[in-house]
Amino acid sequence: MSLFAWNMNCWGSHEIKRTLYLLFLGQVVSFVLALMSFTSSLIADLGVDTPLTQTLFAYLGLALIYGSIVLYRRQKLRVSWYWYLLLGFVDVQGNYLVNEAFQFSSITSVTLLDCWTIAWVLILTWFFLGTRYSLWQLFGAAICVLGLGLVLISDAGVGGGGGSKPLLGDILVIAGTIFYAMSNVGEEFCVKQKDRVEVIAMLGIYGFLVSVVQASIIELKSLESVEWSTDIILAFAGYALSTFMLYTLVPFVLKLSGATMFNLSILTSDMWAVVVRIFFYHQQVDWLYYFAFAVVVIGLIIYSITEKDSAPVPDLEGGNSSAQYEALTNESEASRNESLAS
């Protein structure tokens, strides 16, 4: 009996350490996400309207670092280049629209409205990846949308949202989350081909190329009018670094903790946004935002605790996708246990 109790105590200690480790990783990602939002809002506050250019440097960093690893391997790409081009294009559009939203709306509204991505991902994976969700998951997603609707009401003037044109900013964010959702679903397909480094590298390469072409068409005049200062350069550097860290950390954290704890952990980035708005921008946050945040939290908890394994991803390149997906699942589970045991 004492031996059994000792084993239970050891198991409990291991689980506590595991949970604390995963929570720590989730909060690192949450802080990086908040830093990314803060630097983007700071760039807008400094009077610079170049959302494509500010992401260009982050894509360049991903291309140089992870692209070098792919070149060193000298392996054939697991996914055709045109899928990566499409992935890079939609990811750039998502970043462009959300960063542009900071010109018109507050940091709190932009960060919370990012949760619209969940609803779009649910729809896209249902139709294109064959993923099926329970009624409880759909109910949780509906509650999230209700909470996000309260943010729109607040920004429409009932609660007095921040920003010069908050409703326009909110519309840009929601449009951006559609592209984020397409990017997430595309990354899910590509990552399940078992090479995360290749996905990040190709996203960086094609994201950089798309950003250069699009910025040369849209932002050339805005760039010429920018009066560069130390503050602007530091804000650009901070955004590029935080974006690079986010793209690097997210696949690793998802591999260890899964989507459930990840979705719940990054909710604290919204509260970081509240802190920034109050103490840095010296703006008040209306009570309706806090209520909306609480509703979104409840919806995400319901969605997460009823989350089930997704269906196998269809193989667009040919071959047995079910076998590949099963092998990846087993490999991820084994590596997760190894990482947590060490």
Image: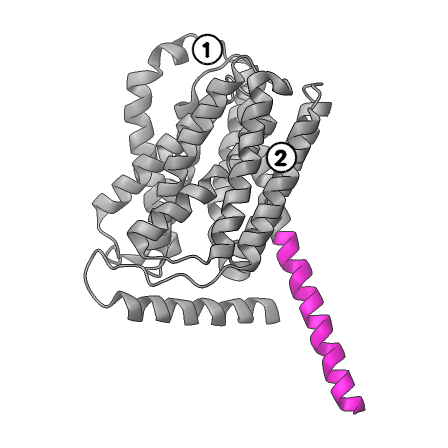
Task: Quadrant for the N terminus, please.
Answer: bottom right
Q: Amino acid at mark 1?
A: Val
- Residue furthest to the right in view is 2
Q: Earlier in the sequence, mark 2 or mark 1?
A: 1
Q: Which residue range is magenta in the image?
A: 1-25
Point out residue 182 in the picture as x, y percentages from the top left corner. 35, 42
Tell me the quarter of the picture where residue 106 sits.
top right
Residue at x 59% of width, y 41% of height: 296
105 in magenta: no
Q: Amino acid at mark 2?
A: Ala
Label 1 residue SS: loop
Point out residue 70 in the picture as x, y percentages from the top left corner. 33, 52
Residue behind mark 1: 226
In the image, 169 versus 302, the foreground residue is 302
Tell me the quarter of the picture where residue 29 sits.
top right
Residue at x 18% of width, y 61% of height: 318
Residue 76 relative to residue 187: left or right: left
In this picture, is 314 found above or below 172? Answer: below
Task: Quadrant for the C terminus, please.
Answer: bottom right
Q: Main secondary structure of the magenta part?
A: helix
Residue behind mark 2: 292
Point out residue 241 in the picture as x, y percentages from the top left corner. 52, 36
In the image, 81 versus 112, the foreground residue is 112
